[in-house]
Each structure stands twice: as C-alpha cells, then as structure tokens.
Amino acid sequence: MPHYHVAALSYRLAALNYRLADTNYRLADTNYRLADTNYRLAACNYHVAARNYHLSDISYQLTAFNYRFAAAIYRYSHLPLTT
C-alpha cells in the first residue's frame, strides 16, 4: 500500500508545480506589461522634454527680442515724435 502514498504525493507535487508554473506565467506577463508601460512612459517623457526644450528656446528668443526692442525704445525715446 505505500505506493498509494507515493502516487498521492506525486499528484500533489504535480499540482503544486502546475500552480507555480501558472504563477510564473502570470508574473512574466505582468513584467512584460510593466516593461511595455515603462517604455511608453519613457517615450512620452522624451517627447515632453523635447517640447519643453523647444518652448524654452522660443522663450529665450522672445526674451532676446524684447530686450533688443526695449533697448531701441530707450535709445530713441529722446527723439521728438514726427507726423
């Protein structure tokens, strides 16, 4: 009769192995989804950084123009207005 105990133990180990394999599959799938999300967020972050750089460049150009415009106004502010 001991062979029944061995068979029962073998069955339980096979069931445990199945559950562990299923858990491993689910964890691998979750890991894949997280990696994909991380990639998408990194791509989004790159585009936001590029847009931020572009907007900063525009801001710099506008500030430089504003400075030159203010300097021109200051330079010519003493001249009388002509019609």
Image: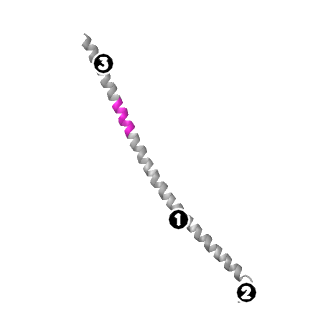
Magenta residues span 20-28
State whether residue 60 is above or below residue 73: above
Secondary structure beneath disc 1? helix
Helix, strand or loop status at disc 3: helix
Task: Please state which of the two labelled residues, at mark 2 or mark 3, is closer to the viewer.
Answer: 3
Which residue is painted at 33% across and 32% down in the image? 21
Badge 2 or badge 3: first in the primary sequence:
3
Disc 2 element: loop
Residue type beneath disc 1: His
| Mark-to-mark CA distance, 2 and 3 | 104 Å
Residue 77 percent location from the top left of the image: 73, 82
Q: Is residue 3 left or right of residue 67?
A: left
Residue at image mark 2: 81
Instruction: Name the dominant secondary structure of the magenta segment.
Output: helix
**Quarter of the rendering containing residue 9:** top left
Report the residue marked by disc 3. 9
Write down the residue under mark 1: 54
